[in-house]
Amino acid sequence: MNVKKIMIIGTGGTIAGTGNGASALTEYRAGSIGVQELMQAVPTLEGYGPFESIQFSNIDSSEMSPYRWVRLALLVNEVAERDDIGGIVITHGTDTMEETAYFLQLTVHTKKPVVMTGSMRPATALSADGPVNLLQAVQVARSESAKGQGVLVVMNGYIDSAREVAKLHTTDVGTFGNAQLGHMGCVQNGRGYLYYAPCRTHTKDSEFILREEVELPPIGIVNLYAGLDLDVIDFIAQRSKGLIIGGFGHGTLPQSVREVLKKITIPKVRSSRIGNGIVSSNSSDAKEGLIVSDSLSPVKARILLMLALQRERSREDLERIFASY
């Protein structure tokens, strides 16, 4: 039987990091070893081959950027179109994994499994979690149930959807999850088990198509705090094509902030700094030109608005997009 390849794309991160000894869990150099070396550290991985690998980058994921996202999405789309590829696994740092995953969720057009993984401990650490995470990511990429489910994040034995997943702890190996809706599935006995499917538009059905390297419009984020200097909002808005406001609680905006926003004419999205729950519209949003983020965090709302504003959109069209994705 002709078994299709799994493509493993390395971008760097802690999973490719090295520290000064086995006890160095938080001080290390991310992106120090290549994807081939990562694969060689998992002896049982070969049983899930054949494989091919690409070293896309080798960086700390805090250095990830929209420019790199576009290039990575173009690469993943190119790989996914190959008849000899059955699935794709991307190794990535955890700091921005949720953002990269959601960007790919919106811009990669395939039913083939696309799985992201990383680690919280460097490769040289005692009980490094990278090898088992990579193995389980490959096992999910080989699972029939992963087809058509969008971009998945596999960490610490769990499977999460790119739209909802978030990093929830600074150092715990169980950091990735979805505090509001729970994990999408788990990995056991060498295969992925999925218990719900993403309902929002993604991957193969997405309207966001990248055919070449493009410069995405800058989108600013202002997370509110008590006593915010209102000049900060103007400062960021003047340098942006769209603005995300991380409000209090249910996206609550003080009247002083609303007055500033009334004078800003770029698209504005009302989100919440909380990280869980839905920001739903109220009677004043339409009058004040505000769009609501639904359940998207400020960083993910930024990504959706960035892609939406590749062309001019009406407020109504932006409302549709935030309700659909």
Image (tube, grey):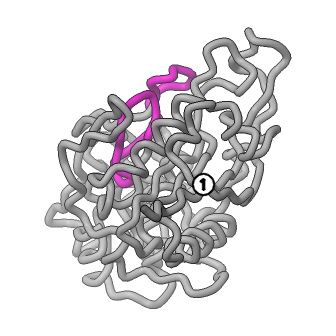
Where 314 falls versus 185 (above or below)?
below
Check disc 1 and report the residue beneath it: 51
Left or right: residue 2 versus residue 192 is: right
Outermost residue toward the right in this view: 20
Looking at the image, residue 120 lies above or below residue 285: above
Q: Position of residue 23 (x, y in %)?
A: 73, 9
Residue sticking out furthest to the bottom:
312
Residue nearest the viewer, comparing 88 with 85: 85
Residue 239 or residue 110, whichever sits in front: 110
Residue at point 43%, 78% (across, down): 308
Question: Residue at coordinates 64% horizontally, 58% vertically from top-left?
Answer: 52
Residue 287 is situated, as x and y percent measured from the top left of the image, at 23, 75
Residue 238 appears in the figure: no
Question: Majority secondary structure of the magenta segment?
Answer: loop
The amino acid sitting under disc 1 is: Phe
Q: Residue at horizontal 58%, vertical 77%?
A: 78
Image-based side of 220 in relation to 38, left or right: left
How far from the left and from the top, in percent, is residue 33?
80, 39
Q: Is residue 163 a member of the stretch shown in magenta?
A: yes
The number of callouts visible is: 1
Q: Helix, strand or loop at disc 1?
A: strand
Of residues 291 and 125, the one drawn nearer to the viewer in this rendering: 125
Q: Is 17 colored magenta in this rendering? A: no
Q: Is residue 278 above or below residue 120?
A: below
Which residue is outermost to the left?
Answer: 283
Left or right: residue 195 compared with residue 43 = left
Tag 1: Cα neighbours inside 10 Å, few (<14), some, or many (≥20)? Answer: some
In the image, the segment drawn in magenta is 154-175
